[in-house]
Amino acid sequence: MIDVDVLRVFCDPAGAFGNALGVVRDGAALPERAARQAYAAELGFSETVFVDDAARGLIDIYTPSARLPFAGHPCVGAAWLLGADRLATAAGPVEVRRSDGLTWIEGRAAWAPGRTLRQYGSATEVDGLEVPPPGAWVYAWAWQDETAGRVRARGFPGRGDGIDEDEATGAAALLLTAHLARPLEITQGRGSRIATRPCGDGLIEVGGRVRAAPHS
């Protein structure tokens, strides 16, 4: 039996919504990458994190079909669960801070390649999109209020691994923030909320609320 903490990451201010994340605190229970990949596929979350050293914040991230060097919602969730001030990922060190109930992590756009940012004319258009066929990882977005930096977004991984739409996607939000070079308040999926801001030196902060959730 492998113990898994299940979190919801990027909840709204009332604690609703958020993207499910599995965290295996005892990474030594599944030390091999193939076994981790198989277990991540079995769990079926958009990402699953294996903690290899809680004191150092050393984590290993998997989708149901691939290992990721970095991803936003796993880093935010793992940092919240572990109480870490820094994470060690395959992409590099990730600084962590906490403010006003949000957990923030820093990352670089170069750590999150392969996503296509696709702008639409209105939030209504984004709401009405059908899930595209497998192929490109598409982050569909539109301004809700450009002056205020409020964005409506939906994420379609396109991997064909059972995750047709990602409820909240920190890495794609990071890329959009780097592209627009301004802080954003993003509503993604059914109602998840992602906050972002550029920090200089190519770093982007991604922040959100995290709640524990039962795993059925």
Image (cartoon, rainbow, N blue to C red):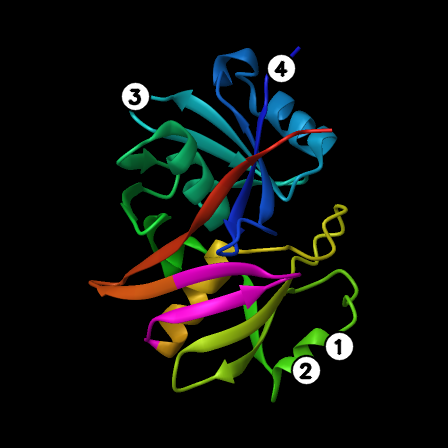
Name which residue type carries label 1: Gly
- Do the numbered discs 4 and 1 sit on residues whose CB atoms are within 8 Å? no
Whether 160 is drawn above or below 8: the answer is below
Quarter occupied by residue 1 = top right
Pointer 2 or 3: first along the chain: 3
Report whether residue 40 is seen. yes
Q: Which amino acid type corresponds to the residue marked 3 in the rendered image?
A: Ala
Q: Which residue is mark 2?
A: 124
Disc 3 crowd rating (10 Å Cα; few below 14, some 14-19, many 20+) is few
For numbered disc 3, what is the local secondary structure? loop
Look at mark 3 in the image and give the residue it sits on: 55
Disc on the earlier residue, 4 or 2: 4
Residue type, label 4:
Ile
User: Which region of the structure is painted magenta?
Assistant: 181-195
Label 4: which residue? 2
Secondary structure mostly taken by the magenta-highlighted segment of the chain: strand
Name the spot of residue 94 as percent of width and height, x first: 31, 43
Q: How many marks?
A: 4
Residue that appears at 49% across and 18% down? 27
* Residue 184, picture quadrant: bottom left
Q: CA distance from mark 3 to mark 4?
A: 20 Å
Secondary structure under badge 1? Answer: loop
* Residue 185 drawn in magenta: yes
